[in-house]
Amino acid sequence: MDISLVLSNVLTPPILFFFLGMLAVFAKSDLEIPQPIPKLFSLYLLFAIGFKGGVELVKSGVSLEVLLTLSAAVLMSVVVPIYTFFILRRKLDPYNAAAIAATYGSISAVTFITASSFLQEIGLQYDGYMVAALALMESPAIIIGLILVKIYAAKTNDQEFSWSEVIREACLNSSVFLLIGSLVIGALTGEHGWKFLSPFTQDIFYGVLTLFLLDMGLVAARRIKDLQKAGAFLISFGVLVPILNAAIGIAIAKLIGLSEGDALLFCVLCASASYIAVPAAMRLTVPEANPSLYISTALAVTFPFNIIVGIPLYFYVIRLFWP
Amino acid sequence: MDISLVLSNVLTPPILFFFLGMLAVFAKSDLEIPQPIPKLFSLYLLFAIGFKGGVELVKSGVSLEVLLTLSAAVLMSVVVPIYTFFILRRKLDPYNAAAIAATYGSISAVTFITASSFLQEIGLQYDGYMVAALALMESPAIIIGLILVKIYAAKTNDQEFSWSEVIREACLNSSVFLLIGSLVIGALTGEHGWKFLSPFTQDIFYGVLTLFLLDMGLVAARRIKDLQKAGAFLISFGVLVPILNAAIGIAIAKLIGLSEGDALLFCVLCASASYIAVPAAMRLTVPEANPSLYISTALAVTFPFNIIVGIPLYFYVIRLFWP
Amino acid sequence: MDISLVLSNVLTPPILFFFLGMLAVFAKSDLEIPQPIPKLFSLYLLFAIGFKGGVELVKSGVSLEVLLTLSAAVLMSVVVPIYTFFILRRKLDPYNAAAIAATYGSISAVTFITASSFLQEIGLQYDGYMVAALALMESPAIIIGLILVKIYAAKTNDQEFSWSEVIREACLNSSVFLLIGSLVIGALTGEHGWKFLSPFTQDIFYGVLTLFLLDMGLVAARRIKDLQKAGAFLISFGVLVPILNAAIGIAIAKLIGLSEGDALLFCVLCASASYIAVPAAMRLTVPEANPSLYISTALAVTFPFNIIVGIPLYFYVIRLFWP
Amino acid sequence: MTPVTRMEIIASSAELAKILASLDQVGVPSYTVVRNVVGKGQQGQVTDDLVMSMLDNVYVIAFFPPDLTQRVTEVVRPILNKFGGICYLSDATEIRSTLRVAST
Amino acid sequence: MTPVTRMEIIASSAELAKILASLDQVGVPSYTVVRNVVGKGQQGQVTDDLVMSMLDNVYVIAFFPPDLTQRVTEVVRPILNKFGGICYLSDATEIRSTLRVAST
Amino acid sequence: MTPVTRMEIIASSAELAKILASLDQVGVPSYTVVRNVVGKGQQGQVTDDLVMSMLDNVYVIAFFPPDLTQRVTEVVRPILNKFGGICYLSDATEIRSTLRVAST
Ligand SMILES: Nc1ncnc2c1ncn2[C@@H]1O[C@H](COP(=O)(O)O)[C@@H](O)[C@H]1O
Ligand SMILES: Nc1ncnc2c1ncn2[C@@H]1O[C@H](COP(=O)(O)O)[C@@H](O)[C@H]1O
Ligand SMILES: Nc1ncnc2c1ncn2[C@@H]1O[C@H](COP(=O)(O)O)[C@@H](O)[C@H]1O
Ligand code: NA
Ligand code: NA
Ligand code: NA
């Protein structure tokens, strides 16, 4: 594998600031980014990526390729939690297995954004509708996770299980809502809206992403001590399952005939795990599961793996198979 | 009335994100923008609009037109609370009547900013000194409100009523202070300051406004249930009085001979009601009035009405009467 | 001294907004910028200045001039606390004397940034490696301050004095850490990173600085009443010592052969006093000293003096001596 | 100087709406909420460094007449069964201000 | 282990300065303030979703010697007359740290 | 309805880690932390308007069995010697929720 590819990913400000954040924790610096500053960054990123996606979706139109990609995305977010559940059940109780499975079926918006910055830096195009795929992959995984709990965990306590609440939580949690809302508004206002908003949503985007990754580095490093609880099984899970999912993702992308850029984004969606939306939903609907397990595996193992090694690795493989 | 005019106002990112915010509340999404993020946006908007106004005021100079406009603005902020007070007294006690009257005599900076974005989008000029009118209309309304309380409410309790405190609160509350301060600094530093600040105060302005309106949508929708307490009287008041004030505003603008753009801004100032500065002042000086009445009428009725229907409606009327 | 020079410094948005902040406090306006908004600004400024410094450092390379400047910077941050300690001891106990001495040996990043904006406005170049000097001057002063305490204060209580903790606090406190981290990343990513980050780190920099100085004005004015405790001795100290240090700084700059721009930045580093990093470190390591003394002298006397009078004054002197 | 019961609840912010509704329902319409508190309990550490604030705690304080204590306890207890959280009671004395400016 | 009185005041943030000045005046120079709390009371719901923070509450806690109780009560009560707000007392025990590093 | 001791500590945020470690060590593993509180005490006014938050206070609340009181006090007291800060105890009653969903 081309080492310069890894370097050209690692030697970018966002990734280096992620390391700086981790280093701050390990070196016991008192650097911290207090709430709600990270929340502001994250609102901004979802808003900007959604809006841009909408504007470009309307430019490119809805072709067969688009429909195929979106269906494949939803399919992956259904299949991944099911197969990973059975892997996880070998070591974990059904609650924790289902919660972690849902996490990996869903996606990490920041991983996606980092991959799109990577493409931008190496000067490769990608399509706006990939953001729609991003938005569509959050909810199904949550619902599948809960169905798994319903089937495999004999609930003994009298907690009623409200499906309407579950669906609402899955489809209306703030990330999904803001992302889809911005996408729709981007599509409605098109080029005209873009002209007015792009100095905000486009020009300073990379800078906000960089600061946000500094915070993610701080947060991920603080979670690393939780990994002891997770143990070797979950740590290997957090590296191997993304690679497997990325491989499936690349195969699907090839089948549909996506461009190199879109293929990278698609496989990054498959490979990434949610550490925001799904944990919030799981905390509400499967309180029996241990949050430190599903958050720290996704955040302290899979997220760094994907943004540091995964993105250039998957791209290297794509380069091999694309003409 | 030209439907495309309404659409060209409604189909802009700021208005659509306002709707998205309302939708989030109605759909029970957990989307929220925690403090002090909205406060940051609001500081930024006042800072940017004031600074720009100052720079342009000094460019255009202080003509007779400017003086006439500013006098008319102050006059409206004195007259409106007086006449609305007597309308409101028919249903409400003097405390609440005076507080609501003051609210409508004052202005909403965000409505003004939205109207100026509307003008910018349809490519119409407006003058910088309109920001001075904006700044001048906050304080008189507060003072008139308190004079009305003093005259019509037989205060029985021994609370002393400190005029110096009232004037300070009216003239030095944070919005007025920041707006006037930025205006003066804009005038002092002129083109030179503009060159350095405009990437911040101009280029990303529209984006910050959009995110702020997302928050305003959330807040306005949460206030809607308070409207039950307000009842049909206050709801109609919140729609009809702005229309009436806008009509008076348009007539004055015609008399003075303002341009179309300035006429729109002037009538939007007359039509809008304060939901930040005046409520804060009233809470301090007329604690007998019920904040949920004056805040929710201004915020959940008049504000959405103005930014969605009012701005294009008033503009349509102006188009009819201007050559 | 050329009065237009003072005016061209004072009549800039950052300085005028600093005055506006002070005015808000004196006029008892309720304007305030709640935490963590100022923290966001300060993170941003350190990030942006560090990153830019790194990019330019790598462009210019490490020459003898660079090494001489950095050594002189470290030397000043060692010498200043020692000589000022003996001045301060005439009126203060060793704890307070050492804490204030450390404060003046260290630097104020915002004063540095204001000086670099001043240069930018009058169109004068300065070199990126000056940011490295900024970063190197924070820690030594803290360590010297603690050594002075160790030597001159007979510690009677059994508090153990952990040197490893002291060094960590001196070298890894959040400002130093973020500044050096951003500098290194700027150097690593160079022009390529700059292209993507500069709309964020460069274009809106001046605007964020302006808003931050508004907050600094608020904070400094609130501290002014603390100056009563400090008394005439500390107030004169807060004006005279910066002038003396600036003079030494200018002499050194002349000796090394720095350009006019770099000379101004170097002497501003010598003249400024820390009100963030060092106070935090002193609060932790010399709890016997009174924070209101060292914070208010640095913040309410030296900081305003430097940014209003000092910068143009020092520059005037530099102009006299440079060809 | 009336004696009252002081109740403190610390629970996941996800349960805030439910807790306040229950208090209302049994006749405790007044309360104070401190948000974004963190802590450690049986369920482990609660921090708020993640972006979505779903995972932090709220601290609810309510003062009410002692005779309500049992009903309040009954209604709060089951809510804490799901996500954990704690509830403590203590005694306090109320300083009523004699004259309240009528607001409506 | 000295017995002390624990006073809790929850009131509009607009009154904070006045409350702290009164405490000072009657000899209670030490207190803690938790800002941005929200709640519900006789005056209705207090939220902080509006931009200007004038409308939220503050939570003031002060511990002081029991014999001050009456004077403190007298001075706090009238302040709460204007905007509402509450004040409760309870008993507590102070754990004084024996050795305080002299600061000035 | 078990009787418990309620401990409140208000101290510089710089000491938070040390305080929590000490509580843990003597068998008080549960607590709640309200950050960014401000106040005034023997060491003077504490505000949080400076950029780095090193200078504000934290408010730690912990409930524990009364028989731990002495050990807890002993371990907390010396920490407060350095930067000041206060510690008060009072009595409270615990409302244990009978059924806790086992999480691990
Ligand atoms: N004994 C205690 N004292 C103070 N706070 C507690 C205590 N036990 C639990 N908490 C708080 O309540 C939250 C939930 O508790 P738990 O359900 O036991 O995990 C914790 O995160 C703490 O903030
Ligand atoms: N019984 C109570 N228990 C706890 N907090 C209360 C209580 N009553 C009032 N409060 C708080 O005090 C504020 C003002 O109360 P009031 O003047 O009754 O509206 C409310 O917004 C609540 O935050
Ligand atoms: N009597 C008291 N009542 C409430 N809070 C206090 C009291 N004394 C001190 N504090 C708080 O504890 C902090 C440190 O206290 P001290 O060490 O006395 O300066 C102060 O800043 C206050 O927030
Ligand atoms: Na995935
Ligand atoms: Na008006
Ligand atoms: Na210095």
Image (cartoon, coloured by chain):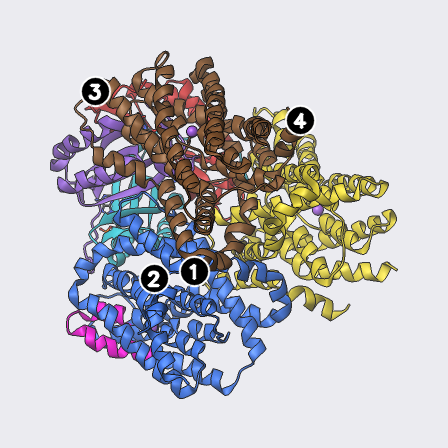
Chain colours: A blue, B yellow, C brown, D cyan, E red, F purple
| Parent chain of label 2 | A
Q: Are marks 1 and 4 on the same chain?
A: no
Residue type beneath disc 2: Ala
The stretch of residues the image draws in magenta is: A78-101
- Work out which residue is located at the far top of the displayed protein and give it: C90
Mark 1–mark 2 distance (CA, rounded to whole Å): 11 Å
Which residue has dot 2 on it?
A280
Which residue is labeled 4 in the image?
A: C3
In this rendering, the answer to whether D1 lies above or below C227 is below
E42 on left or right of A251 = right
User: Secondary structure beneath disc 4?
Assistant: helix
Dot label at residue C155: 3
Q: CA distance from mark 1 to mark 4?
A: 57 Å
Judge if badges 4 and 3 mark residues of a common chain: yes
Q: Is residue C117 visible?
A: yes
**Magenta-colored segment: predominant secondary structure:** helix
Ligand 3 has an atom within 8 Å of the beta carbon of the residue at disc 3 = no
**Label 3 sits on what residue type?**
Lys
Depth check, front residue: B290 or C323: C323
Viewer-side residue, A21 vs F10:
A21
| Callouts 3 and 1 close, C-beta under 8 Å | no
Circle 2 crowding by C-alpha within 10 Å: few under 14, some 14–19, many from 20:
many
Q: Chain of mark 1?
A: B
Around disc 3, counting alpha carbons within 10 Å, would you say few (fewer than 14), some (14 to 19), or many (20 or more)? few
Badge 3 vs badge 2, beta-carbon distance below 8 Å: no
Front tag of 1 and 2: 2
Callouts 2 and 4 close, C-beta under 8 Å: no
Look at the image and tell me whether residue F104 can be seen. Answer: no
Q: Which residue lies under the disc numbered 1?
A: B30
The quarter in which the N terminus of chain E is drawn is top left
* CA distance separating discs 2 and 4: 60 Å
Q: Position of residue B183 (x, y in %)?
A: 67, 40
